[in-house]
Image (cartoon, rainbow, N blue to C red):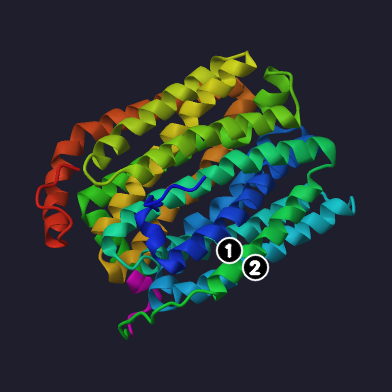
């Protein structure tokens, strides 16, 4: 039934054709990415039954982001972010299809997974800062940027909901190899979307400064401004401790909750539901007011969720607690990202976002390695309790300094014409 005079209200960022293409392509590909993530940790645990090797694979997949992201940031500040993303997506597709072939032919070994995870980490070191810095180029109006970032979080976590659920079923029915195959093929959607975009040429100032000096400038700018520094340090803490659960979930699914691949899929999907709800909430916000408070309280929500999940021995309760884990995680990530993208100077955007990548993705491998080691010695339950306490303490520390950080950010928002009175 059609209603006359009714207008469909689209999110502000969807007014930009390039962003619509980006959203559609990424939405499809990210489902495949989450299928691969759950298939990888299940395959590693099936092959080795080792919490330590779960941590090692998580470490190798993301450690390049810690060391190479600053160089990736310099690269995307000096060259086309659009073309960089096309290249990284092609390489990521090759990586996933290679893993699919190895798994389908039955010759896959743990060292194959480690090497290919390391290769994916190298790709991410350039892809992540390019993707973060590229978002402002996709929206035609600066005031739509916060909505675009929130929609990215919604898209990411919608896939995080769908991907693990599908992945768990696929693994249980026909095996993890087909998750890798679907992921590899899903990159085609991203590449088509990127090629269909019309991107305006970006003015890049000619500079003879060597890359190391430009990296130094990026660090001085980033850590010289307390609001940016505080957001990055909190992100690093959440990455180091909270994200350990992603490699320990198979142990809870199989040994503690007495389930299998489907249980793992449901747990990851429940986390995705919580994150999706958080992303939807942020996407419907009409102002940047209050984002500072969201950053401050979100790690506490996440920490409480982790502690409750670690103590649960009842699947419905575990699923419920994972809602809070996903919700707290995405609220902290997306709110922090929005503030960073808003206050950073455009000629330093790539470098700042590369350091943001270091603080989040780059710290995750150390957390994975630490989580695997602790779980092997004190058990996964005690490990997640420690992680939850660390998140709560970080949340309280950030909240203590929030009023001071607000005053420092206020002039920037006023200068950019975004607000006349800032209480972020």
Kindly identify the residue that appears in the image at 78 percent across and 44 percent down. 176
Q: Secondary structure at mark 2?
A: helix
Kindly identify the residue that appears in the image at 56 percent across and 72 percent down. 86
Give the left or right position of residue 17, taking residue 119 as reference.
left
Q: Residues within 10 Å of mark 2 (few under 14, many from 20)?
A: some
Q: Residues within 10 Å of mark 1 (few under 14, many from 20)?
A: many
**Residue 135 - label:** none
Mark 1–mark 2 Cα distance, whole angstroms, equals 7 Å
Kindly identify the residue that appears in the image at 27 percent across and 44 percent down. 230
Does residue 82 show up magenta in the picture? Answer: no
**Residue 123 - label:** 1
Q: Position of residue 71 (x, y in %)?
A: 45, 68
Image quadrant occupied by the C terminus? top left
The image quadrant of residue 167 is top right
The image quadrant of residue 192 is bottom right
In the image, residue 43 sits, relative to residue 250, either above or below, namely below
Closer to the camera, 179 or 116? 179
Res. 237 in view: no
Q: Position of residue 44 (x, y in %)?
A: 74, 41
Kindly identify the residue that appears in the image at 49 percent across and 32 percent down. 274
Give the left or right position of residue 238, taking residue 413 as reference.
right
Residue of label 2: 91
In the image, residue 322 sits, relative to residue 55, either above or below, namely above
Pointers 1 and 2 in contact (C-beta within 8 Å):
yes
Q: Position of residue 101 (x, y in %)?
A: 83, 58
The stretch in magenta equals 208-214
Q: Secondary structure at mark 1?
A: helix
In the image, residue 194 sits, relative to residue 352, either above or below, namely below
In the image, residue 173 sits, relative to residue 63, either above or below, namely above
* Badge 1 or badge 2: first in the primary sequence: 2
């Amino acid at each position: 039934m059609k209603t006359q005079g009714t207008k469909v209200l689209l999110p502000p960022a969807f007014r930009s054709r390039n962003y619509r293409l980006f959203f559609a392509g990424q939405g499809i590909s990210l489902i495949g990415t989450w299928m691969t993530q759950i298939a990888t940790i299940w395959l590693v645990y099936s092959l080795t039954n080792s919490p330590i090797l779960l941590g090692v694979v998580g470490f190798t997949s993301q450690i390049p982001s810690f060391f190479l992201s600053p160089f990736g940031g310099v690269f995307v500040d000096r060259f086309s972010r659009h073309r960089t993303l096309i290249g990284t997506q092609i390489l990521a597709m090759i990586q996933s299809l290679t893993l699919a072939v190895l798994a389908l032919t039955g010759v896959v070994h743990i060292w194959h997974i480690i090497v290919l995870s390391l290769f994916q980490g190298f790709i991410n070191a350039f892809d992540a800062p390019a993707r973060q810095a590229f978002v402002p180029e996709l929206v035609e109006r600066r005031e739509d940027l916060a909505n675009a970032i929130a929609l990215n979080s919604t898209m990411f976590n919608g896939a995080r909901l769908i991907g693990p659920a599908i992945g768990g079923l696929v693994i249980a029915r026909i095996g993890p190899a087909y998750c890798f195959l679907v992921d590899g093929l899903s990159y085609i959607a991203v590449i088509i979307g990127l090629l269909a975009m019309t991107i305006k040429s970006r003015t890049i100032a000619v500079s003879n400064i060597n890359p190391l000096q430009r990296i130094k400038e990026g660090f001085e700018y980033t850590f010289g401004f307390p609001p940016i520094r505080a957001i990055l340090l909190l992100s690093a803490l959440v990455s180091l401790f909270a994200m350990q659960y992603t490699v320990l979930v198979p142990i809870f699914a199989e040994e503690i909750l007495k389930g299998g691949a489907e249980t793992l899929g449901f747990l990851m999907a429940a986390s995705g539901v919580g994150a999706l709800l958080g992303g939807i909430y942020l996407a419907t916000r009409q102002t940047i007011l209050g984002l500072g408070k969201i950053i401050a309280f979100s790690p506490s929500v996440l920490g409480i969720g982790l502690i409750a999940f670690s103590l649960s021995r009842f699947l419905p309760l575990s699923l419920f607690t994972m809602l809070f884990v996903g919700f707290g995680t995405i609220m902290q990530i997306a709110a922090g990202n929005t503030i960073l993208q808003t206050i950073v100077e455009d000629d330093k955007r790539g470098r700042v976002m590369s350091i943001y990548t270091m603080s989040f993705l780059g710290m995750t491998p150390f957390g994975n390695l630490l989580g695997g080691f602790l779980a092997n010695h004190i058990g996964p339950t005690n490990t997640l309790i420690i992680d939850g306490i660390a998140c709560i303490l970080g949340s309280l520390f950030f909240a203590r300094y929030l009023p001071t950080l607000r005053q420092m950010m206020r002039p920037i928002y006023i200068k950019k014409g975004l607000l006349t009175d800032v209480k972020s």
